[in-house]
Amino acid sequence: MKSLLMTFVLCIVHLAAISQDKYRLLVITGGHGFEKVPFYNMMDSLGNFSYDRIEQPKANELIASPDIDRYDALVFYDMNDSITLVQKQAYLRLLQKGKAMVFLHHSLVSYQNWDEFQRIIGGKYYEKATLVNGNSVKSSYQHDVIIPVKIENPAHPVTKGLADFEIYDEVYGNFLTQPTIRPLLSTTHPGSSKYIAWTNPFGRSEVLFIQLGHGPEAFGNSNYRKLLRQGMEWSIERHR
Ligand SMILES: [Zn+2]
């Protein structure tokens, strides 16, 4: 009887351990500064996830290796330009297979010279003035602003339970979006492009991008945390 009880207790402990680490993330940074302590405090607060941290350019080496299969989702908070042909092919292969990828904030600025990247993430931030369909486009940013956020699709699992909110954060202006995006959030802030979160189908994947998330004020915002938690849960479930 005693051993039966012990087995039962051990099973419960084992189940608890499994449910605590339900999802395994790879959190990718590098190429842009950020406040690490509040960022990882936010990551720790989301629950239901365990994660490994890696910085670029090491992350792209891992992405091009079989070890990347250990992760349920890749979370990009990097701003990186260096990528080899083999690594580009690895991104494309993963997306064709249906890998969960979540891109945050300044990751929109990555890979200025890799055209395919904007079709993956669903938009492009132009660091330098560039001719696009005959027009000169240069993107912009503005720190420390109060951004009115409108929920574009309240029925979506990423935004469920959220009402329109305000957040103290950074806007990006004059960036372009792909016609394929499925908008989740928008803003009327004059310094921002309209859509500030979306999903974008690519291969068998549907990438999630959230423009918000510059610093501690955003990391501590309960709406932002909910968005991120639901975003990562949706992304993983969508690609199982
Ligand atoms: Zn920023």
Image (spheres, rainbow, N blue to C red):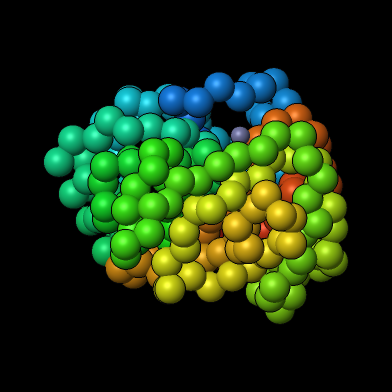
Classify residue 3 as left or right of residue 102.
right
Residue in the picture at 42% in, 51% down: 137
Classify residue 5 as left or right of residue 22.
right
Ligand 1 shown in quarter: top right
Percent from the top left, x then y, of residue 239? Answer: 44, 65
Q: Is residue 227 above or below residue 104?
A: below
- Can I make out residue 234 in this image? no
Given residues 73 and 121, the one toward you in this image is 121
Residue in the picture at 61% in, 24% down: 34
Quarter of the figure with the C terminus: bottom left
Percent from the top left, x then y, of residue 105? Answer: 57, 43
Percent from the top left, x then y, of residue 144? Answer: 76, 34
Q: Quadrant of residue 121?
A: bottom left
Residue in the picture at 65% in, 53% down: 192
Q: Quadrant of residue 84?
A: top left
Spot the residue most to the bottom.
Answer: 155
Spot the residue most to the left.
Answer: 85
Q: Quadrant of residue 120?
A: bottom left
Residue in the picture at 67% in, 64% down: 185
Percent from the top left, x then y, of residue 132? Answer: 33, 58
Given residues 95 and 10, the one toward you in this image is 95
Classify residue 36 as left or right of residue 222.
left
- Can I make out residue 225 in this image? yes
